[in-house]
């Protein structure tokens, strides 16, 4: 109960992230680079929030919602990863790197569940549409407005419920599981962080790299590397 | 019929942020489109039968990229006004216009924002977080929303002025040169960013092994996504467990 106000805030962020992901605004407050540092700030560990944001931002950007298709709910997963991660670190369940990787693995499961919940919500939206059809036949403008905005309410509730339940289950189950991992695994788990970052870069590169653009990447990489060595040499 | 005012256009603009709220598999953004045009419906129609026709017309199938939807909203507002002032008996051109505009709006919006600008800014945001901490998030939000708001506002105003003629401005082929330019810039940015990450790794105890794992997992992800071999979650799980095994061996 000591974290009750923070948990309420996390659920609220979950609801807002869920709306911003697809239902409304889409001003990108739902992106992990924004939501995760904010969660870190709420719990008093900004560094952990930033780390989660950096690791989870790129991989999910490959899910392009064209023609109504959508992948895992990576944004909501990132909210859960950041909040569970910060909580476990605060309670010193294990070392930082082990906690980060365990939270990210857990968030993958949450993202998958989120995807099915969104599919369910979109099926429910068909009912709103039929209701709007009936309202249109009697020219009830207010009812059409209310029915449409119910979609925002659905998304908000989905975010709150998914994040709230996942966070609660996470802080109940993960400490026991994570506590079992020997502390000398910390280095190996730390290495895995850079693996995830690499996945993000590799995945995003598929959107940009082609025969025409690959030399831009290679030349920019080599020039930056040369610049870095020059900088280190001068130092 | 009362004339459409600037205030009504502002209302449509604000409502356009919620166009996807009731997204459904049957008519996609149909209900959202009708919702956005309600300020217009209130102004243009005095008789109930005309209002019902209007609502039914715009509850029909519609799809678009959410940011680009303002192009359709502005143009339809203009055309509906024309239909009343010129006393059109047949309103089918409005429905045909909406059907025709769905393709370009989706194609341009998805390519420009979901495939180029959002990922490009995502890459940039990571550099911002490394450099400025939590302030990087705020800078990212401000910068990303410049093109976002620009497209929404420009789309609404231009299409409201041009009506049917807005179709001429919406050509994927015409926009391709800008897309290519953005892709060159982002590819270069990815190269610079990779070095920033590697430099960051060298500030930690992971040194070479961290840098090698970063580059290797990047290459594996690139090629497996190109060939659609693995989903993102499977890739992350695979890379995590492989990295842990390698980390334990070192």
Image (cartoon, coloured by chain):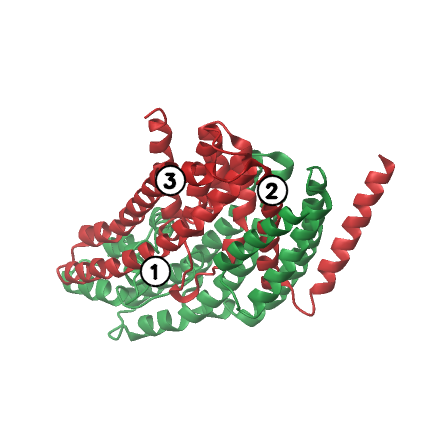
Chain colours: A red, B green
Mark 1 lies on residue:
B77
In the rendered view, would you say A172 is above or below A208?
Answer: above
**Residue B205, how many percent across, how many down?**
69, 38
**Residue B108, how many percent across, how many down?**
50, 65
The picture quadrant where one finds residue A123 is bottom left
Distance from Cα at disc 2 to Cα at disc 3: 22 Å
- Residues beneath discs 2 and 3 located on the same chain: yes
The residue drawn where x is 52% and y is 70% is B171
**Residue A56, how many percent across, how many down?**
52, 47
**Residue A51, how many percent across, how many down?**
56, 39
For marks 3 and 1, give the one nearer the viewer. Answer: 3
A124 or B225: nearer the viewer: B225
The local secondary structure at tag 2 comes to helix
**Are discs 2 and 1 less than 8 Å apart at CB?**
no
- Residues beneath discs 2 and 1 located on the same chain: no
In the rendered view, would you say A131 is above or below A81?
Answer: below
The image's mark for residue A142 is: none
For marks 2 and 1, give the one nearer the viewer. Answer: 2
Distance from Cα at disc 3 to Cα at disc 1: 55 Å
Distance from Cα at disc 2 to Cα at disc 1: 56 Å
Q: Is residue B138 visible?
A: no
The image's mark for residue A190 is: 2
Residue A97 is left or right of residue B163, and the answer is right
The local secondary structure at tag 3 comes to helix
Q: Mark 3 or mark 2, which is nearer the start of the sequence?
A: 3
The local secondary structure at tag 1 comes to helix
């Amino acid at each position: 109960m000591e974290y009750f106000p923070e948990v309420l805030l996390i659920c609220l962020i979950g609801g807002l992230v869920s709306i911003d992901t697809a239902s409304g605004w889409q001003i990108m407050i739902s992106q992990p680079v924004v939501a995760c540092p904010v969660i870190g700030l709420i719990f008093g560990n900004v560094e952990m929030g930033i780390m989660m944001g950096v690791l989870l931002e790129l991989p999910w950007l490959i899910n392009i919602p064209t023609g109504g298709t959508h992948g895992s709910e990576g944004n909501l997963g990132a909210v859960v990863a950041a909040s569970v991660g910060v909580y476990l670190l605060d309670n010193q369940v294990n070392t930082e790197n082990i906690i980060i990787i365990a939270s990210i693995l857990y968030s993958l499961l949450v993202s998958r569940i989120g995807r099915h919940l969104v599919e369910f919500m979109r099926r429910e939206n068909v009912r709103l549409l039929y209701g709007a059809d009936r309202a249109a036949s009697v020219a009830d403008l207010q009812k059409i407005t209310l029915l449409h905005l119910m979609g925002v309410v659905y998304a908000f509730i989905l975010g709150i419920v998914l994040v709230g339940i996942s966070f609660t289950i996470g802080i109940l189950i993960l400490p026991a599981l994570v506590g079992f991992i020997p502390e000398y695994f910390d280095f190996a788990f730390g290495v895995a962080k850079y693996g995830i970052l690499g996945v993000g870069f590799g995945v995003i590169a598929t959107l940009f790299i082609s025969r025409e653009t690959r030399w831009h990447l290679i030349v920019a990489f080599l020039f930056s590397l040369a610049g870095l060595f020059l900088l280190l040499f001068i130092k | 019929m009362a004339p459409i005012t600037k205030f009504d256009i502002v209302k449509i603009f604000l409502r356009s942020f919620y166009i996807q709220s009731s997204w459904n598999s049957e008519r996609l953004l149909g209900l959202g489109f009708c919702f956005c045009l309600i300020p217009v419906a209130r102004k243009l129609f005095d008789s109930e039968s005309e209002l019902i026709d209007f609502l039914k017309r715009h509850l029909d199938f519609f799809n678009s990229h959410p940011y680009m939807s303002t192009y359709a909203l502005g143009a339809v507002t203009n055309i509906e006004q024309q239909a009343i002032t010129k006393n059109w008996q047949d309103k089918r051109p409005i429905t045909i216009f909406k059907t025709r505009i769905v393709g370009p709006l989706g194609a341009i919006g998805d390519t420009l924002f979901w495939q180029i600008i959002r990922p490009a800014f995502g890459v940039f945001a990571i550099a911002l977080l490394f450099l400025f901490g939590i302030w990087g998030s705020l800078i990212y939000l401000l910068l990303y929303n410049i093109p976002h708001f620009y497209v929404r506002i420009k789309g609404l105003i231009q299409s409201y002025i041009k009506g049917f003629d807005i179709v001429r401005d919406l050509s994927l082929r015409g926009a391709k040169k800008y897309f290519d330019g953005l892709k060159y810039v982002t590819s270069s940015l990815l190269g610079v960013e990779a070095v920033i990450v590697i430099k960051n790794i060298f500030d930690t105890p992971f040194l070479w092994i961290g840098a090698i794992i970063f580059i290797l997992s990047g290459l594996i992800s690139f090629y497996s996504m190109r060939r659609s071999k693995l989903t993102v979650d499977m890739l992350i799980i695979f890379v995590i467990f492989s990295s842990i095994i390698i980390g334990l061996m070192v």
